[in-house]
Amino acid sequence: MRIPVLDKDRKVLMPTTPAKARLLLKTGKARPYWNKLGIFCVILTYSIKPNNQTIVMGIDPGSKFEGYSVTGTKETVLNGMSEAVTHVKKAIEQRRGMRKARRHRNCRRRKCRSNHLSGRNFLPPSTRARWAAKLRILEQIRKVIPITNVVVEDVKAVTKKGKRRWNRNFSPLEVGKKWFYNQIRSMGFKLTIFGGYVTKKLRDFFHQKKTPQKSKKTFESHGVDAWVLAAGVAGAIEPTEKGIYYWIPLRFHRRQLHYLQPSKGGIRKPYGSTRSYGLKRGTLVNHVKYGRTYVGGMQQNVERVSVVEARTGIRLTQYAKIHDLRVLTTIAWRTQFIPSFSEGVSLCR
């Protein structure tokens, strides 16, 4: 596993080996840093002129899980697997029901407004959230690794002639991926799109096997497809790293004003926020007792916050004091590094 490196001015440099990263930290020439994806990096204490080479990122979209791989001409920098954002559709329906209930309770009801998006290019919220999550991961990796090219496996919806309803159900997929491709090009990357049959040919060419268990947290589930896509452009011969980062996006309730059901006396307690006594929820901190955790919810009127285990998402306590926390950075994903059994545990766990 390669370690991303930034210089004093946060310029992205070529990744280094764990041994060199440990030496830099030991000699005081660098300091540790975690980005929003939970990827461990080192920041140099001096400036240096970049001498970056070609690095390609492969993306394997999926309905439940996504695969990512970043590789150079020889070395594999990192592999990743993330859970797709699937909660948005249900959340939108719930919000719509709450809005209708509020209008019904209000005696002075207003008329329903007309659709303001009529005649415009509309991307469904669930579709946008799914494809935007890939863009956020790409953007965060771009900030620590000098990516030059992006390769994406093209997903296509099977349509049926004369079945307008069948074709219409798949239209968000086509609209979403086109929006995704345009966003990648606007970010300045050179985009390459391969069909699924090309991915299969690349797997056979590199002698890589894929497991049918798509939910399995291994390189062979989704990372292998992302790697062969990247290697097909970068020119790598074999994956030098099969450990993966497993990312689960953190979910914050921003728009829900109170609990769905009132408490005793008809009182609806407030619910949903992105801050806990001045700290943004999802802030990666070091707790004096529990170690590296991130900030969750808060207790009203007692100035105590919840801290959650950074890898498993298990809440450790609801009564952590603010002065017992040392802020590291802000994260947006719950991250776990899963090493390959044949390679042992990496520095970046």
Image (tube, grey):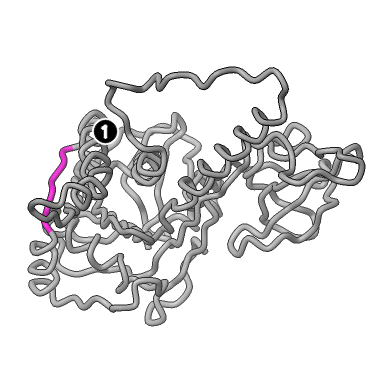
110 in the magenta segment: no
Question: Residue 318 or 131: which is nearer the viewer?
Answer: 131
Please tell me whether residue 268 is drawn above or below residue 284 in the rendered image. above
- Residue 327: percent from the left, percent from the top? 68, 41
Question: Residue 342 or 277: which is nearer the viewer?
Answer: 277
Q: Is residue 48 left or right of residue 103?
A: left
Q: Is residue 346 left or right of residue 238?
A: right
Q: Which residue is mark 1?
A: 183
Q: Which residues are magenta?
A: 190-195
Quarter holding the N terminus is: bottom left
Residue farthest bottom in this picture: 342
Which residue shows up at 27% across the image and 21% down it?
Answer: 119
Which residue type does callout 1 highlight? Gln
Please tell me whether residue 268 is drawn above or below residue 307 in the rendered image. above
Q: Residues within 10 Å of mark 1 (few under 14, many from 20)?
A: some
Whether residue 60 is visible here, answered yes or no, is yes
Q: Please tell me in which quadrant of the rendered image residue 83 appears.
A: bottom left
Please tell me whether residue 234 is drawn above or below residue 43 in the rendered image. below
- Residue 10: percent from the left, percent from the top? 43, 33
- Residue 74: percent from the left, percent from the top? 19, 60
- Residue 155: percent from the left, percent from the top? 19, 54
Q: Main secondary structure of the magenta part?
A: strand
Q: Please tell me in which quadrant of the rendered image residue 311 appears.
A: bottom right
Which residue shows up at 72% across the image and 60% down it?
Answer: 315
